[in-house]
């Protein structure tokens, strides 16, 4: 089985994705496509005359070249299906369910890293490949893969195909808040928290949910310290980003934390974060 790890910024919804991956693991097996031509030596009769030294040397060189070529061909990885990525059918259904359950207020992201170094894989390429499908996927420098919700590819039974060997990669799956770009309201925070709770309720059996902490806040986070987040309501205030957390790349960040119970009281308040922010569930 491929090595698959699951991560969410606040670690509150990791069990969600791990459960779904375990439930779907039986649906697909990784396959490798490699060529390995057979080599059947010819029999030599006992009364065959000896060859000349030059002929013997040439024959030996040719034989060695053929053997080397065959060895190279036998280990050449031409394409690998599902080496670490979940089947596209599972990814499509998972993303569709999260979008529907959360009313498109939660985003799901897939990041591919090296199973050995946990860093982005150099020169990685991933395709959706099927009978009528051949689509290369966009991959960011940090390893995030743009997996499309392509109904035609889904119907075609398309699978992920990569240029990497089986077992060489791992998958990190993240749930992140989906908020407006620049200015948003407490109501947007409240809706996103509720959407994440609904997505978990829809996708995770109750007997797993009892072991999961609830998603009950969102952090507006920065890489640097001493940042503040401007909030405008009956009065204007600068909220300090002094709650430490971990971002999707597993870097330490500093966050202004907005709890569900607090934002529910003043849903009309405006949040105007400084540039460079990112939102995570906490």
Image (tube, rainbow, N blue to C red):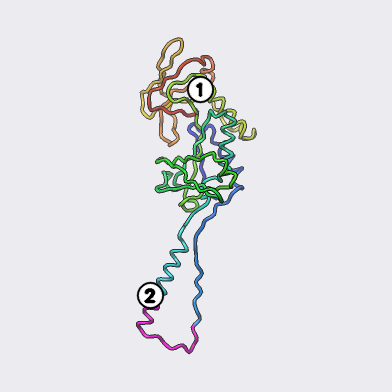
The quadrant where residue 193 appears:
top right
Rendered view: 145 above or below 272: below
Q: Nearer the viewer, residue 182 or 117?
A: 182
Residue 51: within the magenta? yes
Which percent across, then down, holds residue 198?
Answer: 59, 28
Q: Residue at x 51, y 24 (%)?
A: 217
How many marks the image carries: the answer is 2
Which percent across, then down, holds residue 58?
Answer: 37, 78
Tag 2 near tag 1, CB within 8 Å? no
Which percent across, then down, holds residue 248?
Answer: 45, 35
> In the rendered structure, which segment of residues is drawn in magenta?
44-61
274 left or right of 11? Answer: left
Rendered view: 72 above or below 239: below
Which percent across, then down, holds residue 237?
Answer: 41, 14
Q: Residue reaching furthest top?
A: 234
Q: Residue at x 36, y 79 (%)?
A: 57
Task: Give the label on residue 189, or none.
Answer: 1
Q: Residue at x 36, y 28 (%)?
A: 224
Q: Residue reaching furthest front?
A: 132
Rendered view: 20 above or below 129: above
Bin the neighbour count of mark 1 within 10 Å (Cα to Cα): few under 14, some 14-19, many 20 and up.
Answer: many
Q: Nearer the viewer, residue 209 or 187?
A: 187
Task: Give the label on residue 61, or none.
Answer: 2
């Amino acid at each position: 089985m491929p090595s698959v790890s699951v991560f969410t910024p606040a670690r509150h919804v990791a069990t969600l994705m791990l459960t779904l991956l375990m439930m779907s693991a039986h649906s697909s097996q990784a396959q490798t496509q490699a060529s390995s031509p057979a080599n059947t030596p010819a029999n030599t009769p006992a009364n065959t005359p000896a060859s000349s030294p030059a002929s013997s040397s040439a024959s030996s060189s040719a034989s060695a070249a053929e053997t080397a070529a065959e060895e190279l061909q036998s280990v050449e990885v031409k394409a690998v299906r599902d080496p670490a990525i979940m089947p596209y059918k599972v990814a499509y259904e998972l993303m569709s369910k999260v979008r529907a359950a959360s009313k498109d207020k939660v985003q799901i992201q897939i990041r591919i890293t090296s199973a050995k170094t946990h860093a982005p894989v150099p020169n990685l390429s991933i395709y959706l490949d099927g009978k009528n499908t051949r689509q290369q996927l966009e991959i960011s420098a940090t390893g995030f893969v743009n997996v499309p919700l392509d109904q035609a590819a889904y119907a075609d039974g398309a699978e992920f195909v990569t240029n990497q060997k089986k077992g060489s990669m791992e998958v990190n799956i993240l749930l992140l808040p989906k908020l407006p770009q620049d200015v948003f309201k407490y109501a947007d925070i409240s809706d996103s928290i509720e959407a994440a709770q609904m997505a978990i309720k829809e996708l995770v059996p109750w007997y797993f949910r009892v072991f999961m902490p609830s998603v009950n806040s969102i952090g507006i986070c920065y890489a640097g310290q001493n940042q503040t987040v401007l909030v405008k309501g009956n009065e204007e205030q600068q909220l300090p980003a002094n709650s430490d957390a971990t971002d999707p790349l597993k870097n330490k960040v500093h966050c202004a934390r907005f709890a569900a119970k607090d934002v529910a009281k003043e849903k009309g308040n405006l949040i105007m974060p400084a540039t460079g922010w990112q939102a995570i569930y906490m």
